[in-house]
Amino acid sequence: MNHEAAARHAQGLRSAALTLHAHSQRLLAAIPSGRYTDESSFQAVFDQLGHSVGSVVLLSFAIEVMIKAIAAKGGVDPKRTHHLGQLFGALACETQNSVEGRFLTVWRLENEADPPTKLRAVLDEAATAFEDWRYQFEGKQSSLGANIIRLKWAFVAIQEEYAAP
């Protein structure tokens, strides 16, 4: 695996995910008082849900690729799985600890408080989001609780780890 190409790919996925997320937030904000007032507001909510699904899928995939880039950069052949928790758990303990520390730092910079959970818990919560959110219309809901804000900061921490010497 070419870790540099993988990291560039992951950054592009993240950018697309955040663009979709911002668009979905604008759609949702346009609905008066968050209620269905007419057919167009119902359509706006429906559109927002589709964009939210896309943003979670892309961001979880970006995290997967960036974790694999870290593994490849360290000379390890990354696991062939989409499971974020397993991928993160396969990294060296010192790398995991470093990324956890970075997550705490980037979270505090944005939120001025400790994160509500550790990075590993965020990744376990969203472990199969890439697969589950793509197929949510089939009724499978094992990781539909993935939190895009936590995933956003998880990506930043993982990306910083990749960029570190």
Image (cartoon, grey):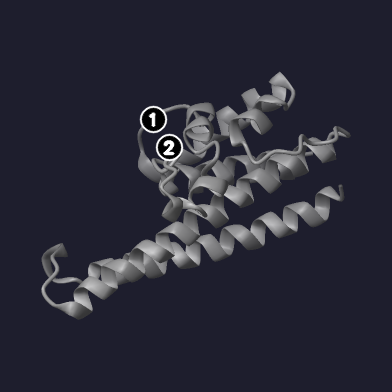
Q: Is residue 129 above or below residue 113?
A: below
Name of the residue lying farthest toward the bottom? 40
**Mark 2: amino acid:** Arg
- Nearest the eye: 88 or 153: 88
> Residue at (44%, 58%) from the top-left corner?
53
Question: Please, what secondary structure does the residue beneath circle 1 have?
Answer: loop
> Residue at (74%, 41%) from the top-left corner?
68
Q: Is residue 44 visible?
A: yes
Name the residue carrying label 1.
Answer: 114
> Residue at (22%, 71%) from the top-left corner?
42
Q: Is residue 102 above or below residue 63?
A: above
Q: Position of residue 151 (x, y in %)?
A: 49, 44
**Mark 1: amino acid:** Asp
Q: Position of residue 92 (x, y in %)?
A: 74, 23
> Residue at (42%, 37%) from the top-left corner?
108
Pointers 2 and 1 in contact (C-beta within 8 Å): yes
Q: Residues within 10 Å of mark 2 (few under 14, many from 20)?
A: few
- Which quadrant, please, contains the C terminus? top right
Question: Is residue 82 shown left or right of residue 152?
Answer: right
Name of the residue lying farthest toward the front? 138
Name the residue carrying label 2.
Answer: 108
Disc 2 to disc 1, how far (Cα)?
A: 6 Å
- Nearest the eye: 146 or 132: 132
Q: Quadrant of residue 31?
A: bottom left
Name of the residue lying farthest toward the top? 93
- Nearest the eye: 73 or 109: 73
Q: Which mark is residue 74?
A: none
Q: Position of residue 15 (x, y in %)?
A: 57, 63
